[in-house]
Amino acid sequence: MDTKDMPRIEFPCRYPIKVMGEAGPGLPAFVTRTVEHHAGDLGAEDVQVRHSRNRNYMSITVFLQAESADQIAQLFAELKASPLVRMVL
């Protein structure tokens, strides 16, 4: 698929980001703080935390109000730079 044929995101929009890492109290706090730095305050309904079956890993899904592709790119870069984070989708 050519990039010009890919669907475009229309901003502003509600945008989900999923962050995965080793389970621990620091990961949700870091993810929430980082997203709020880039996108403003989040409500309890904007953050979902799930543990793996053996509770070794967790995923945090955050729904934010995205204003631009650059905003999302900067947020992804900051999240990926943390040693707490294994993957960002």
Image (tube, rainbow, N blue to C red):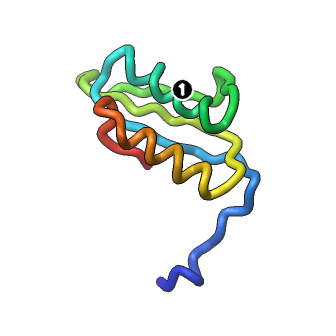
Percent position (x, y) of residue 34?
52, 31
Percent position (x, y) of residue 57?
29, 28
State left or right for residue 86 relative to residue 32.
left
Count of marks overlaid on the render: 1
State left or right for residue 76 relative to residue 56.
right
Q: Is residue 42 above or below residue 4?
A: above
Q: Secondary structure at mark 1?
A: helix
Residue located 56% across and 35% down the image: 62
- In the rendered image, the residue lying farthest to the right is 12
Q: Compare residues 63 and 79 and report the one nearer the observer.
A: 79
State left or right for residue 48 relative to residue 40.
left
Residue located 68% across and 47% down the image: 66
Query: How would you rate the neighbour count of disc 1 (Cα within 10 Å): few for under 14, some for 14-19, many for 20 or more?
Result: some
Circle 1 sits on which residue? Answer: 32
Percent position (x, y) of residue 42?
66, 27
Q: Is residue 62 above or below residue 24?
A: below
Query: Which corner quadrant of the image does residue 54 belong to?
Result: top left
Residue located 67% across and 55% down the image: 68
Residue located 61% across and 29% down the image: 36
Percent position (x, y) of residue 23?
31, 22
State left or right for residue 85 relative to residue 6.
left
Q: Is residue 37 above or below residue 69?
A: above
Say which amino acid is labelled 1. Answer: Thr
Q: Compare residues 81 and 29 and report the one nearer the observer.
A: 81
